[in-house]
Amino acid sequence: MKQEKTREQLIAELIGCQKDLEASNRSLIHFREKADALEREISALIKAVDEKTQETSHSFSPPQALRKMTARIMTVIENEKRYRQLIDQANDIIYRTDERGCFTMLNSVAAKLLGYSKKEIMGKDYRDLLPTSYRKKVEKFYGIQFVKRTHDSYLELPLLKKTGDILWIGQYVQLLRENDAVIGFQAIARDITDRKRAQDALSESEQKHRTIIENIQEGYYEVDLSGRITFYNDSLVRTIGYPTDEIPTLSYRQFMDERTARRVFRTFYTVYKTGKPAKALDWALIRHDGAMSFVEVSVSLIIDSLGRPIGFRGIAQDITEQKKLEEELRRLSITDNLTGLSNQRHFYVKIAEESKRAQRMGYPLCLIIFDLDDFKAYNDTYGHLAGDEVLRLVGEIVKNSIRRDVDTAFRYGGDEFAIILPSSTRDEARKVSDRIRRNVITRVHGIDISVGIASLNAGDSLMALIHTADTAMYRQKGMRKNKE
């Protein structure tokens, strides 16, 4: 005959089921069926406890908190499902404004999301799209970036659509400059309206699930303490590009280089030791096909029912296209459009870096500055289009006369050029300048160059180095004119 369970045994089983539910809840989608089965089992056990209590003379009240917890878990499951549907679609927005804040360019996605035609938005002041309560905050943001010349900054703000509805965007804003003067702003933005709504809804959910649900934007992952992937979603599969059936066998180290793997390990270790989550970490990943992708990642510690760390979880948002655009914008910001050489602004950054490195490492550094003799007369004779063609040709000659990935060439201004030569002596720099002069004289009719060379000595200041090269160039130019 089967022995009937006591009330204490039933309560123990209830507690065991509660722990199983908590463990299942950490992987809401993957273990949905198990959670449903456990909920049915709990209901049956509660019913059994009620029946058992009625048979005894002792006062006993079933654990109401357990019923509430089960209901909360099911609510979170449904919230997570709705939130996933919201964040599965992501749209990028790109726009530019002039220094006054009037739109000078925007893409079709921006116009479509705002409900306007491009024609309606072009020339419009961005303040006209802001709710009144946000105007001062956004004006202050742009003002600080303008005054401090901050290259790029991040801001989340609401915009008024044509319908009067609110469109929330998260944007990276960059300064547009011309000749070191700010001429406007450029932004790369994403529609985060759904995320904002989801965050508002999720703020009412259980605290223990908030870390996961609030931050989910793209991929979701869980790894154990050894770094092996134990749970993931379809978005993560798309981001790392591995076949679905291979991912459970992977460690994070298998789809990133050694440098990134060390950064990831340090992050996991810090989160493990402190228990504090880490957010907005940029990691470079190597996809299954060998291509690089970039993700913005958050990391939180997974704790079991006994309070022991058992792994890590987080979200991974694919920012590959954003990174490519940022790199292209950076390249354009330091490149002279006519010659393809680096521009004057980048010259001052690079010469400072190379001079510090040379003095620290103890190797020689030379600077060449040269300009085109009588270039103004050439322009007056043959026209500015011909003059521009000469500058392009000189830029090509310079590129082909220096060491790739070692030396750096610049259009210093007008018809002046500069070359930084790390680990080069004055004799080596003279050979480079002679080679450039021979090619210019050979390929450009009627044009010669005047050259100044300076080498970095111990204790020399940056401006002293530049001044020495500049003075030497003008001295040579003067000597030639005197001979004439």
Image: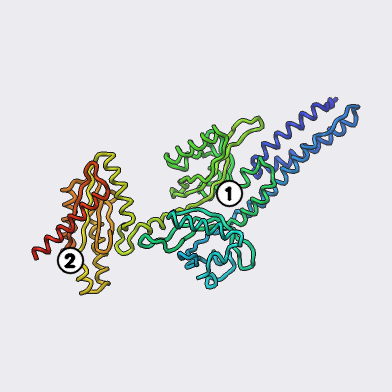
Q: Is residue 388 visible?
A: yes
Image quarter of residue 192 = bottom right
Residue 473: numbered disc: none
Residue with the most extreme left position:
483
Up-down relation of residue 135 to residue 232 (above or below): below
- Residue type indicated by callout 2: Ile
**Does residue 334 appear to the left or right of 117 in the view shown?**
left
Question: What residue is rendered at 17% in x and 55% in y?
Answer: 472
Residue named by callout 2: 447
Q: Secondary structure at mark 2?
A: loop
Q: Quadrant of the N terminus?
A: top right
Up-down relation of residue 385 to residue 222 (above or below): below
- Would you say the residues marked 1 and 2 are in contact, meaning their CB atoms lie under 8 Å apart? no
Whole-percent x, y for residue 432 in the image: 19, 53
**Does residue 426 appear to the left or right of 281 in the view shown?**
left
Q: Dot 2: within a 10 Å radius of its alpha carbon, few (fewer than 14), some, or many (20 or more) residues?
A: some
Work out whether residue 1 or residue 342 is closer to the camera in this orientation and state it.
342
Question: What residue is rendered at 48% in x and 55% in y?
Answer: 144
- Residue type indicated by callout 1: Asp
**Count of numbered marks:** 2
Q: Quadrant of the C terminus?
A: bottom left
Work out whether residue 394 or residue 141 is closer to the camera in this orientation and state it.
141
Q: Dot 1: within a 10 Å radius of its alpha carbon, few (fewer than 14), some, or many (20 or more) residues?
A: few
Residue named by callout 1: 234
Reading the chain from its start, which is encountered first: label 1 or label 2?
1
